[in-house]
Image: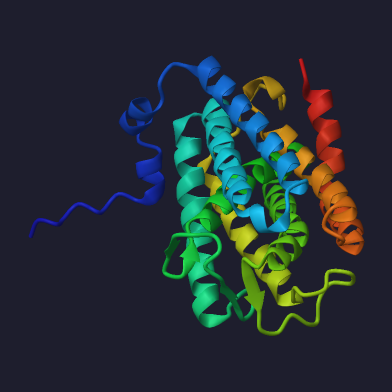
């Protein structure tokens, strides 16, 4: 009896040469330039955000995520090809959305929380901008892992830490802005009041899954050091760490978050910055 051909796997689809050729125009310089312009827009939006009245910050929040997300996708495309960009959107965006939907409706793995209507349109209760935020930071975090660790497993763990440590800054800021709330915010990290420890444990768990999938799907740019000519993702990661330390201390009245987040995210951001500088040609 004839058998039906097996359905193609996700990896096979993402690896399809015709698909990659169709999605990858021969414009690496133009793509890198667009990524840098979007990265510059991200930095400008964040600077303006910190000096804007709290009630007027939501449009800048959304704009920052959109420009940062687009910059990360283009950076992935320029460094590693269309397959990388497609995998980033599918894994970080789709995986982030799935984790948020499950977390929102079950309390696993982040804890019991809920979104307000402040961030606009949503999918299954999750604001659309949220999975885009997973995309925007998952890519530079992957580069952090690859720059700081050669071993596959350690690279995934470092990348996951690079992604999850960012939330030590993000969650207190967004809670204070009224974008989501926690039903049981304690116990929390020392100095990071209002956000439960379960949230950070959940972030680490989801980040490991996302980074492991990206590590498997995205080929490294072999034979080349980590260079800034390909795109702004490394700068945006280090800038996010530095600007978050600065903003929580000077503008958001969260000096303890500035210290704790600065140490936890800085544990990878600082050596990553050194690796990027040394990798320039």
- Tell me, yes or no, if residue 263 can be seen here: no
Relative placement, left or right, of 278 versus 107 is: right
Relative placement, left or right, of 230 versus 185 is: left
Q: Residue at x 91, y 63 (%)?
A: 256
Q: Residue at x 78, y 24 (%)?
A: 279
Residue 53 x/y as whole percent: 73, 53
Relative placement, left or right, of 54 versus 257 is: left
Relative placement, left or right, of 225 versus 65 is: right
Looking at the rendered image, the quarter that the C terminus falls into is top right
Q: Residue at x 73, y 48 (%)?
A: 52
Q: Residue at x 16, y 55 (%)?
A: 4
Looking at the rendered image, the quarter that the N terminus falls into is bottom left
Quarter occupied by residue 42: top right
Quarter occupied by residue 2: bottom left
In this view, the residue in front, 179 or 134, is: 179
Residue 134 x/y as whole percent: 58, 53
């Amino acid at each position: 009896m004839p058998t039906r051909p097996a359905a193609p796997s996700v990896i096979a689809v993402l690896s399809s040469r015709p698909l990659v050729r169709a999605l990858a125009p021969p414009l690496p310089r133009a793509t890198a330039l667009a990524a840098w312009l979007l990265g510059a827009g991200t930095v400008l939006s964040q600077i303006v955000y910190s000096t804007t009245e709290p009630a007027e910050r939501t449009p800048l929040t959304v704009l920052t995520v959109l420009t940062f997300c687009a910059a990360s996708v283009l950076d992935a495309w320029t460094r590693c090809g269309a397959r990388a960009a497609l995998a980033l959107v599918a894994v970080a965006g789709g995986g982030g959305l799935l984790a948020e939907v499950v977390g929102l409706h079950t309390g696993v793995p982040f804890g019991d929380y809920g979104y307000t209507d402040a961030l606009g349109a949503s999918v299954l209760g999750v604001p659309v901008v949220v999975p885009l935020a997973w995309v925007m930071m998952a890519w530079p975090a992957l580069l952090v892992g690859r720059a700081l660790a050669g071993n596959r497993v350690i690279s995934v763990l470092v990348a996951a830490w690079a992604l999850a440590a960012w939330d030590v800054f993000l969650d207190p800021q967004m809670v204070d802005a009224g974008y989501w709330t926690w039903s049981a915010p304690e116990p929390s990290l020392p100095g990071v009041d209002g956000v439960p420890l379960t949230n950070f444990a959940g972030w680490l768990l989801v980040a490991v899954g996302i980074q492991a999938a990206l590590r498997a799907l995205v080929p490294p740019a072999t034979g080349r050091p980590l260079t800034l000519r390909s795109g702004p993702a490394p700068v945006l990661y280090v800038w996010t760490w530095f600007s978050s330390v600065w903003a929580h201390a000077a503008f958001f009245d969260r000096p303890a978050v500035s210290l704790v987040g600065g140490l936890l995210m800085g544990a990878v951001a600082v050596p990553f910055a050194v690796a990027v500088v040394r990798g320039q040609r």
